[in-house]
Image (cartoon, grey):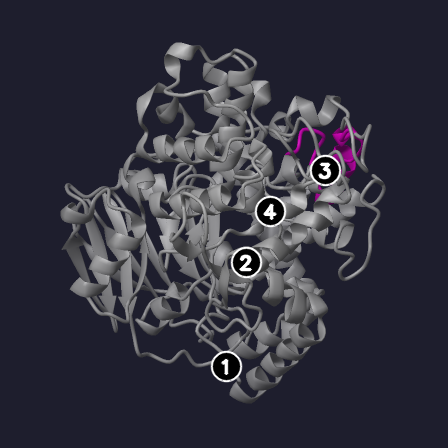
Amino acid sequence: MVKGFVGVNLRVNLSTGEIKKEKINEQWARLFIGGRGYGSKIICDEVDPKVDPLAPENKVVIATGPAGGSNTPASGRVMVITKGPETGTIACSNVGGFFGPELKRAGYDMVIIEGKAEKPVYLWIKDGNIEIRDARKLWGKKTSETEEVIKQETDPKARVVNIGPAGVKLSRIANVMVDACRAAGRSGVGAVLGSKNFLGIAARGTRKVEPFDPAETKTAVAQARKLLKESEITSVNLPKYGTALLVNEINERGGYPVRNAQEAYDEDAGVTGGEEIADKILIKKWACAVCPIACGRVTEIREGKYKGYHGEGPEYETTWALGLMCGVHDLNAITYAHYLCNEYGLDGISAGVTIACAMELYEKGYIPERDVPFPMRFGDGDTLVKMVQIMGERKGIVGDLLAEGSYRLAEHYGHPELSMSVKKQEMAAYDPRAIKGIGLNYATSNRGACHVRGYTISQEVIDWPEPVDRLKYEGKAELTKYMQDFTAVIDSSGMCLFTIFGMGYIRDYGPILRAVTGIPYSDDELMKAGERIWNMERLFNLKAGLTGKDDTLPPRLLEEPIPSGPSKGEVCQLDRMLPEYYQLRGWDEEGRPTKEKLAELGLKM
C-alpha cells in the first residue's frame, strides 16, 4: 500500500445524510500525487463541467497531500476543490494553518461533500467517528465567533474550517476560512459550501501517519530544513517582514498596480510595506503547521479610529489590494479592512480589486449616484472599510454587486474592460506590463488570474533560484509552463509554495515524496505528474465552455502603456508568448491539448 496517506477518503451526502468511508485509489495516488491532483481528479470524474457551481450537483473536495501529517517542513496545506462560481472553471484553493494535518490524524485524507442539506449543518470528525450537527444558530455569524462556538461544542483542541457571512450570502468571492485567520481564497469556494447549507468541518485526531521509510524520510526532511535555513529569503526576510516585504521590491520595478492599475508605481508605497508593518502594528510572527518560515503576522492597530482591533495580517496581497490598488496609503485602514475580510470570509485580493474597479467606475460617472450609499473615491481609507462592510453584507445595490466580483460589477455598468481580471477572477499584485512572465501565467491559469499557479515572480523579480529579465519576452513561455507544472507537484504534495525560496528545484522535493509514499518517482516523473494535473484541469475548463479566447488579459494591460515610474511605456504583448506556450504544452493553435499529448499523459478528452 502507498504510504503517506491514511488510506481512507470520507464521502458525505448532505441530501441523504449518507456517510461512506472509501479506500484511496492507489493508481490515482501514483498518477496525481495527492492534494490538488487527486482532489481535482475526483471533481473531473464526478462533476459535470457544465453544472451550475451553486447547484446541489456540484461537489467539494477538501484534500490533504501525502507530506501532510509528517515532519516535512511547511506541509500543513489543505486544498478546497470544486467548480468555482466566480470563474466557472475548476477551482482549487490552497490554505495553510493546522486543519490539514489534523484531518489526517482524525482518520481521513480527503472529505468529499455532495448534495445539499435541508438546514445548515457542520461536520464533526474525531478519531474516525463522524457526526453531522445542526449549524442553524451559527449560520451567518462571523468566522471567528463560529470557530469559537464550534470548539465549545466539540473539543477545545479541534481544528476548524468554516464559511462566514459572505459564503452564506453566496458571494462569488467568498472564502473558506481555516483557524479563523487563514483563507482558502480565490474563485468563490466559500459560496459553494454556502449553497449546500454546509458551514464547515471540525476535526480532532490522535492517529499517527506513517511514512514508507522513516529513516529516509528523516534524512530528506533534514535536507529540506537545511535548504530553507540556508536561504536568506526563508530564514531571514520572510520571518522578519512577512510577505509584505515585496511591496518595495515590486514597486521599485514599476510593477505595483495602483488605482485599478491605471498606474504601476507610487513613490509612497513603502508606508504600507512589511517594514512599516513590523514597526507600527506587529505583535508577533505566526507559523502554520510544521513551518520553519513563519511568514504570518499577528498585528494590532495602535492608533486612530480603528485602535485596539487585532488579528492576523495583512499579507502582501491584501496590503496591495486593499491599499494602493484602491489608492489608500492608510496602513490602519488597510489592516482593519483585512480583518473584516477574514471575519466575513471574503477573498482579500478579489475584495480589494473589486472595490478599486467600483471606485474607477464611480469616478468616471458610470455608477449613478442613486445606486451608491456614499461617494466611492480612490484614496479614502474610511470609504474602503465601508465598502468591505457593504460587500460582506450584500447591502444595497452596489454592495450586492460588489459581492459578485469586479467583472460582474463592471459588466452591469457597461464597462467590463475596467475589471482587472482573467476568466472573471481578479489579478494579483503584479503588473504584467512590467513583469512579462506573470502576464502569461495570469492569462493561461486554469482558475483565472492567479500568481500562485505559476509564480514566475520568483525568477523575474526575486532572482531565485536563477535571475530572469522581467522585461524580456524570450523564454517566458518555457518558464511559465515549468512553474505551472512544478507548482502542481508542490500543491499536490501538501507542502507550501513558499518552500521554493529555499527548495528551488524539483530535485529538492523528490526525496521527500519518495521516502514518504514509497513510490519511486524520478524527478521527470514528478514533473510529468504536474503536467498531467495541469492538462486535466484544462480539459475540465474546455468542457465547461471556455476556449483559447479566454487566455487573455484586460485591455488596459495589453494596450495602455504604464504612464510613469521605472517601467514607464511598457505594455504586455501577450501575443509574443502565447503561441509558443501552446506549442510547448502540446496544444493546438486554439489552446486544446492534442490527442498525442493526452495519450502521452494517459488522459482522455
The CA distance from mark 3 to mark 4 is 38 Å
Q: Work out which quarter of the rendered image holds the N terminus and state it.
A: bottom left
Kindly identify the amino acid type of the residue bearing the numbered disc 2: Asp
Is residue 498 visible in the rendered image? The answer is yes
Q: Which residue is mark 2?
A: 491
Sequence-wise first label, 3 or 4: 4
Residue at the disc numbered 4? 272
41 lies left or right of 258 = left
Specify few, some or many for label 4: CA neighbours under 10 Å numbering under 14, 14-19, or 20 or more: many
Give x and y (percent) for residue 359: 52, 23
Q: Residues within 10 Å of mark 1 (few under 14, many from 20)?
A: many
**CA separation, marks 1 and 4?**
46 Å
Disc 2 to disc 3, how far (Cα)?
Answer: 23 Å
In the drawing, what numbered circle is on residue 212? 1
> Which labelled disc corresponds to residue 551?
none
**C-beta proximity under 8 Å, tags 3 and 4:** no
Q: CA distance from mark 1 to mark 3?
A: 38 Å
Please identify, in this view, whether the residue under mark 3 or under mark 4 is nearer the observer.
4
* Sequence order check, earlier mark of 1 and 3: 1
Residue 46 appears in the picture as rendered:
no
- Residue at horizontal 60 percent and vertical 37 percent from the top: 324
Is label 1 in contact with label 4 (beta carbons under 8 Å)? no
Q: Quadrant of residue 6?
A: bottom left
Please state the extent of the stretch shown in magenta in the rendering.
571-593
Q: Residues within 10 Å of mark 2 (few under 14, many from 20)?
A: many
Q: Is the residue 356 above or below the residue 210 in the image? A: above
Real-space Cα separation, disc 2 to disc 4, in angstroms: 29 Å
Picture layout, residue 187 above or below residue 413:
below
Alpha carbon of mark 1 to alpha carbon of mark 2: how far?
20 Å
x and y, in percent, of residue 24 in the image: 39, 65
